[in-house]
Image (cartoon, rainbow, N blue to C red):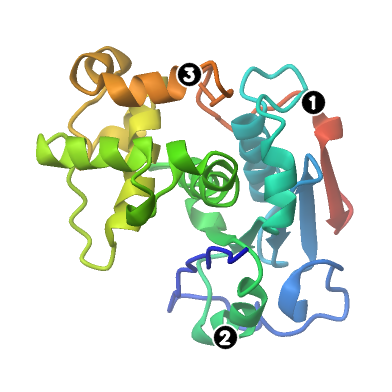
Amino acid sequence: MSLILGTLTVSGGVTAGEFEPKSHAVVGCPGAMFTQQARVFDAITICATEKVGMDKLHHAANVTAKWLDNNDDGIVDEPALLPALRQQGAMLFMSAEGFSDEAFDILMPELEHRVGQDLAANETAPMIGRDASQEEIHHLIVNAGWQFVYPQVFSSQKDQASALYQQWEKAEAAGYYDYGDPTCDDECKTVEFFYLATAAYLGSDADLKSDEMRIKDRRSLRQRLPGIVDLMESSDYHYPTYIWPDGQYQHANNIRYYGTDR
């Protein structure tokens, strides 16, 4: 099965030496640049450089766990996701402020056979501004999990014409959603739309300040795009519909840390 190639953000404001090979690199992360690792439900690996603070790694791991165990009972809500995430090699790459061109070149071969997503520590639970961790981790779980387990419902591929893809088309045609990034194709826009629709459903106001998504809450979503609400609330699977992941997760036994003493 061909895998989705994760998109990494290349940043010019990186810390010198952050991406050089480390003698104490953790096993299971590519490129020998990562010294810290978290395994969430033994299904998603988070690889972090030494410049990523412990608090940022913990926050990202807790957000990941909460997307999977949204009702916070210690058990993954949709068990079918776990084998898919493992098969696709789902991996989140964390750096201080984004990856350099050289780091990107090192990671690219590894991403040919796994689904990857990046996340910068400086945009993870910042003191001021929106927390980007929920979005990037949601993208990873959708791309490596939901799309593969239920392609007729969640695929972002045009030729699949999934229920989600059709809801994105409907939202864009009605003027409810508009993503103006010229580098983002229809597949990308579908994934972005799904995240913002989820933000509206679960009440993440910080994600809805822009005009990309013009439906701002669950009630309006149900009135204007009832199909996307039906998709989220379907009894055929268990999509996260309980609470917005805020970095708090009480079942620490579902997350294992490696590398620096945690």
Residue 176, by quadrant, is top left
Above or below, 101 relative to 185: below
State the mark number for residue 105.
2
**Mark nearer the N terminus (3 vs 2):** 2
For the question of whether residue 33 can be seen, the reply is no
Q: Which amino acid, mark 3?
A: Ser
Residue 69 in which image quadrant: top right
Disc with the residue nearer the chain's start (1 vs 2)? 2
What amino acid type should be assigned to the residue bearing mark 2?
Asp
Which-is-in-front pick, marks 3 and 1? 3
Q: Secondary structure at mark 1?
A: loop
Q: Which residue is mark 3?
A: 234
Quadrant that contains the N terminus: bottom right
Seen at 18% across and 20% down, the residue is: 224
Whole-angstrom CA distance, mark 3 to mark 2, is 41 Å
Q: Residue 131 in the image: x percent, y percent?
A: 46, 42
- Image coordinates of residue 179 in percent, x first then y, are 21, 51
Residue 251 position in % (x across, y down):
79, 26
Question: Marks 3/1: CA distance?
Answer: 26 Å
Numbered disc in front, either 3 or 2: 3
Disc 1 designates what residue? Answer: 251
> Which of the two labelled residues, at mark 3 and mark 1, occupies the earlier sequence position?
3
Q: Residue at x 47, y 67 (%)?
A: 7
Question: Which amino acid, by three-letter code, is at mark 1?
Answer: His
- In this picture, residue 23 sits left or right of residue 193: right
Q: Nearer the viewer, residue 160 or 210?
A: 160
Q: Is residue 130 above or below residue 224?
A: below
Task: Determine the secondary structure under disc 3.
Answer: loop
Q: Is residue 214 left or right of residue 122?
A: left
